[in-house]
């Protein structure tokens, strides 16, 4: 019985060690300054940029996302549903949103 407990404890310790980096990464993303700003995107693009009715944003490069958002700011409203959303943020806020989505795992 003592050997079984040592084995169980060893397996649990190994599992905790393997999961710790993923848990830490996820925790740091919860603290990311762009997460709250990006929450406005979740309704259409899915929670954390996944499984929404529109394109997934998770894992896209920060530069590509930022370029797309800036392009959407230049298009007229009647041609682009994203115009009011992209225009409602400062350049720094858009950078934070793009940075947040770039750090999420790509689907």
Image (tube, rainbow, N blue to C red):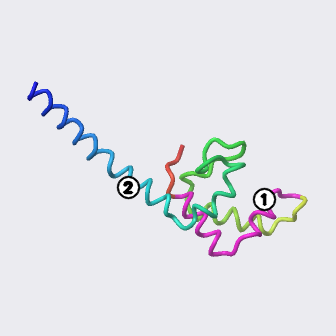
Dots 1, 2 in contact, CB < 8 A: no
**Within 10 Å of the Cα at label 2, are there few (<14), some (14-19), or many (20+) other Cα atoms?**
few
The C terminus, quarter of image = top right
**Within 10 Å of the Cα at label 1, are there few (<14), some (14-19), or many (20+) other Cα atoms?**
some
Give the x, y percent position of residue 69.
70, 64
* Residue topped by disc 2: 24
63 w.r.t. 9: above or below: below
* Residue topped by disc 1: 82
Give the x, y percent position of residue 30.
50, 58
Residue 84, quarter of picture: bottom right
10 w.r.t. 44: above or below: above
Range covered by the magenta-colored residues = 79-102
Give the x, y percent position of residue 1.
10, 24
Name the secondary structure under disc 2.
helix
Is residue 13 toward the left or the right of residue 96 in the image?
left
Nearest the eye: 1 or 96:
1
Separation of marks 1 and 2 at Cα, in angstroms? 33 Å
Magenta segment's dominant SS is: helix
Asked whether residue 3 is drawn in magenta, I would say no
List the single residue furthest toward the right. 78
The numbered disc on residue 45 is none
List the single residue furthest toward the front. 1
């Amino acid at each position: 019985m003592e050997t079984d407990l040592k084995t169980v404890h060893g397996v649990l310790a190994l599992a905790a060690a393997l999961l710790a980096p993923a848990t830490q990464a996820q925790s740091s993303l919860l603290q990311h300054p762009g997460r709250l700003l990006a929450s406005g995107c979740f309704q259409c693009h899915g929670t954390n940029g996944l499984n929404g009715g529109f394109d997934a944003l998770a894992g896209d490069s920060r530069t590509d996302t930022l370029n797309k958002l800036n392009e959407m700011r230049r298009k007229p409203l009647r041609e682009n549903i994203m115009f009011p959303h992209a225009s409602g943020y400062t350049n720094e806020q858009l950078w934070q949103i793009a940075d947040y989505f770039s750090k999420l795992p790509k689907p």
